[in-house]
Image (tube, grey):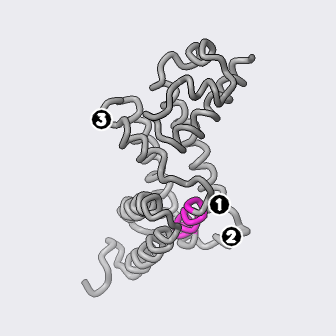
Amino acid sequence: MESAVAREQALDAAETLFYGRGIQSVGMDDVRGASGVSLKRLYQLFPAKEQLVVAYLERRDLRWRQRLAEYVDDPAHAHTDARQRVLAVFDWLGRWFREPGFRGCAWINSYGELGAVSEPVAEQVRAHKRAFREYLGRLVADAGLPAELAGQLQLLAEGAMVTAAVERSAEPAARAGRAARALIEAYGASDPDGVPVGH
């Protein structure tokens, strides 16, 4: 089996198992069984389970952020106005929350399981969250809004992710979206220093 093919098969299986059941409840033998990659080959590709977890998070990060950006940039969703593109993030979160098998944010889940004992995993989580905030920062800048709004929007999005997983509902995305709209409107009525007019 070619290394690249075996690696993708192993990662596909790991992603399904880690995200669906949790990392600590899944052993390398489970990944072997689900992937069809021999245990020997699996350990050649990923000498330690921690390396497999990091690779899973890295690949999922790229795919997750790509899907988000494609939705926000898709003119079919009428996201032509810069401020609407900011709010489209929360529309996309609602779609994600409704997907079969959604069980929260993979990075928050991974941090909860391994963040205290695995620095490589913790760093992957931090890298993902940094990239998400930077993306929000670019959308905010394009809309001519104050930079600090990006961090506030991220907190709304992160809270929606956790709450959606706990409640098993997509409604938190809509609630967070309404709060984001209120923030954008408040900043839109601000002076150049970002202070709301009349305050």
Task: Determine contact: label 1, label 2, CB under 8 Å.
Answer: yes
- If you read the primary sequence from the N terminus, does the residue marked by circle 1 or circle 3 appear first? 1
Q: Which of marks 1 and 3 is in front?
A: 3
Q: Give the range drawn in magenta.
A: 85-97
Which of the image's four quarters has the C terminus? bottom left
Q: Callout 2: few (<14), some (14-19), or many (20+) C-alpha neighbours within 10 Å?
A: few
Asked whether residue 153 is in view, the answer is no
Q: Which of 38 and 163 is in front in this view?
A: 38
Callout 1: SS: helix
- For the image shown, how many numbered marks are present on the structure? 3
Q: Name the residue under label 2.
A: 77
Residue beneath the point at 50% across and 32% down? 26
Residue depicted at 43% across the width and 75% down the height: 184
Decide whether residue 132 is among the magenta residues. Answer: no
Q: Distance between the residues labelled 2 and 3?
A: 40 Å
Callout 1: few (<14), some (14-19), or many (20+) C-alpha neighbours within 10 Å? some
Badge 3 is on which residue? 116
Residue indicated by mark 1: 71
Q: What residue type is labelled 2?
A: His
Which mark is on residue 182? none
Q: Is residue 190 left or right of residue 25?
A: left
